Image (cartoon, rainbow, N blue to C red):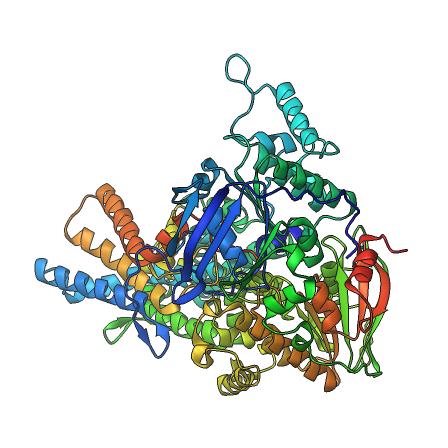
Amino acid sequence: MSTPTRSTPVRPTPGRPVLRIRGVHKSYGPTEVLHGVDLTGRAGEVLAVVGANGAGKSTLIKILAGAERMSAGELQLDGEDVALRSPHDAHTHGIRTVHQELTLVPELSVTENLLMGHFPRRLGGLIDWKAAHRRARDLLDGIGYGAIDPRVKAGRLTVARQQMVEIAKALVSEGGEPKVLVLDEPSAVLAGSDLEALFVLIRRLQERGVLIIYVSHRLAEVTELATSIVVIKDGRVVAETTPDRTDENELIRLMAGRPAGQLYPARRPADGDTLLDVSGLGRTGELSDVSFVLRAGEITGLFGLVGSGRSELARCVFGAEPARTGAVRAPGSDAVRFHSPREAIAAGLALVTEDRKGTGLVLGLSTAENIGLTTLRTTTRGPLLDTARRRRDVVSMVDRLDIRPAHSAKLPVRTLSGGNQQKAVLAKWLLTGPRVLLLDEPTRGVDMATRAEIYRMLDQLARDGMAILLISSDLTEVLGATDRVLVMHEGRIAAELPSEGTTEDTVLAHAIGHAA
Amino acid sequence: MTEQLTRTTGPGDGGPPPPRGVRLPRLTVAGHDITVETGIVALLVVFVVVAGSTTEAFLTEGNITNLLKQMVTTGLLAYGMLAVILTGGIDLSVGSVVAFSGIVAAGLSSGLPVPVAMAVGVASGIGFGLVNGALVARFQLAPFVVTLAALTTIRGLAFVYSETPVAPEKPGFFELGSAVIGPLPVSTLIMLGVFLVGGVFLSRTPAGRSLVAIGGSAETVRLAGIGVRRHIVLAYTISGACAGLAGVILASRVGIAQPSVGTAFELDAIAACVIGGASLAGGKGSVRATFAGVLVLALINNLLNLYDVQSFWQQVLKGLIIVAVILIQRTGRFRSATVNDPNPGKASPS
């Protein structure tokens, strides 16, 4: 992977154990997601935690952050038993967490976000703004993020910059420097010099004896940065190793429980008819001059970093957001572009959105109702819904996609696992009989077994003549499950590459805009 | 913007949401959770038994008929309110619509045939509902603000129409509110009809299911190819129509139309929905349980009257009873949302 060049990694001899967790279990209702996790982290160590989606990394992080309480197990800090009952507890014990979700208040300035709760005061208790901004600037400078203006509203910063402020906030808040800094996918939104600054910062903290727990799925980064690596799979630690003793391929095998190749069905590129022709699509500030075609029988990947416009592209194509210029044509439809999802659906399109819980499902409704949502208007008898027919549709979909538990159709869809929820979303769209299927991060938060099923299903749908666009931020997936890959950079298609024989490095280089 | 939103609401590790805090045992029949309904029915039975055994005035024909008539207004308003609440909205204007439609119907009845005058009254409610719905759906204004403005505007219009109470002269005007079929008042039957038809509408028609789904996630519904705006307009129109009908029936029953009538009626309607387990966030609510909520409120009023409780104390007691009922129902949810989770309901990808 072409991560930016850096100085030789510092790998000091690990110091005393700072954090030790033993036998951590976590259950949500009847479902246990962590089955006894042990971890030891030493001062000055970069402990990488890797695992596939749904392996339990997030849950572990939430426990460390005090946002969730473990169902069983113990946690020691500097040899003393500690109970983390709240995020505040974790904080005062010196465990700082930078979550993947941004937690800045967008309407407040960077200074306010950084110093919240402990502003420098003037006589009389008023906030000394001059001193506050100066302090914020010093803090940012001190950790190599001097480029950020502390007076700007946090919401105005790019996502990458906001992430940097988050990290600064974790370092500076009351209680001084952290003992343990947990970084959850910190590089997901960083690239180029921003990423470099993060690595320099991590090295510096390491030298000062901070334990860094680094969660990432970018394996190249992990092998370069970490002093030790822990692999989590299905809620258990399946391997503890060091970068010297392992490589990316072995890590993938450990995470997936099978060789990387077997996860994805073998694809044979087909040369079918064009089912979607996007030309010159533009939307101010998000997309410019995007052109590509989707063909029957083909799975096309779309890769881009956060902010590259990959989700906006899908929404624009689908008519969920208006485009300013360009055309989206499907055979048999007269539309130049789709002005609403309804038009797109009528032309044979379907969109599985990235945000399954927010825009893919209506969480409070039953699985059956969610599956039947797209066919509400078409399955009627007189003024009433044809309940018998709708029930048959749902049963056949539950059967075909193996949605479990099978009797769950009447239960609220929120009680299903992530993988089965995603199947319900797919079922909803398959009922419309689409010819073009757009999928935005369909395997996020989905367990390994279900991911394999989804890849097989997409493969089969393509073989049956569907045109599929698979949008993903997972490099392995976007190359493994597809026939060719479109790479987006700053709202444009930067490259179109065959999946066979293209390396992750090449794709990433185009996505960052560093391609030769 | 989109990126940021999706980052904060990503899917979790696949586990169902953690059940935390105290949970009441759940009763289910054929997969349907009937805890709320059962609880309310039990409460009603208790009310009736207590009332029947402590005051002789309760189980008299006169009182029962009175009770049945009194619940018509709240009942009609509550059904309309439920339709709006299901979409995640609220309609604060219904009390004012009651006054306006009643006074217009009463006023016009002197010159027009009674059914026509009454139809105009109901139509005025439909009109106000359309405007409310259009403002909420088309201009994306907050339902609370839109209908708060409508509340004061329509109340003002009622006074503009007539500052003093209007007393209709034609005896035909009083038919609707006073006629009975057998033991049942016609107005009560109309309300029951609204609940029956309305129940089928919400549970068995594409539009009804769309309304419920919109309250859960409007964007999911829009992406499924369903027009969100017109369904929102429809919900407010239903509420307006119910309020218009309630106003006409009330004027007919009382025999006089006052521009000041209906103040705070919207609160009883909301209370009935909430007692019935509806969520003000939308997407959750039951027609049957809302009807039970209407009965609960009517019984509370009726009993407090029979016990001769002073009216201010009636208000206090009613408020406390509502809080108690809702607390009992929501114990599980209430607890889980407050325990130690900075982002309830939100999880991040692993």
**Whether residue A440 is situated above or below residue B96 in the rendered picture:** below
Residue B242 appears in the rendering? no
How far from the left and from the top, in percent, is residue B293? 32, 61
Residue reaching furthest to the top:
A123
In the figure, is residue A343 to the left or right of A75? right
Which sits in the foreground, A25 or B127? Answer: A25
In the figure, is residue A61 to the left or right of B58? right
Looking at the rendered structure, the number of numbered marks drawn on it comes to 0
Which sits in the foreground, B166 or B296? Answer: B296
Residue B11 appears in the rendering? yes
How far from the left and from the top, in percent, is residue A427? 59, 78
Q: Quadrant of residue A438?
A: bottom right
At x 46% / y 51%, what residue is drawn?
A: A63
At x 25% / y 51%, what residue is drawn?
A: B321
Query: In the rendered image, which quarter contains the C terminus of chain B?
Result: bottom right
How far from the left and from the top, in percent, is residue A493? 84, 61
Residue reaching furthest to the right:
A516
In the figure, is residue B173 to the left or right of B128? left
Q: Quadrant of residue B196?
A: bottom left
Which sits in the foreground, A382 or A85? Answer: A85
How far from the left and from the top, in percent, is residue A67? 46, 48
**Whether residue B320 is situated above or below residue A508 in the rendered picture:** above
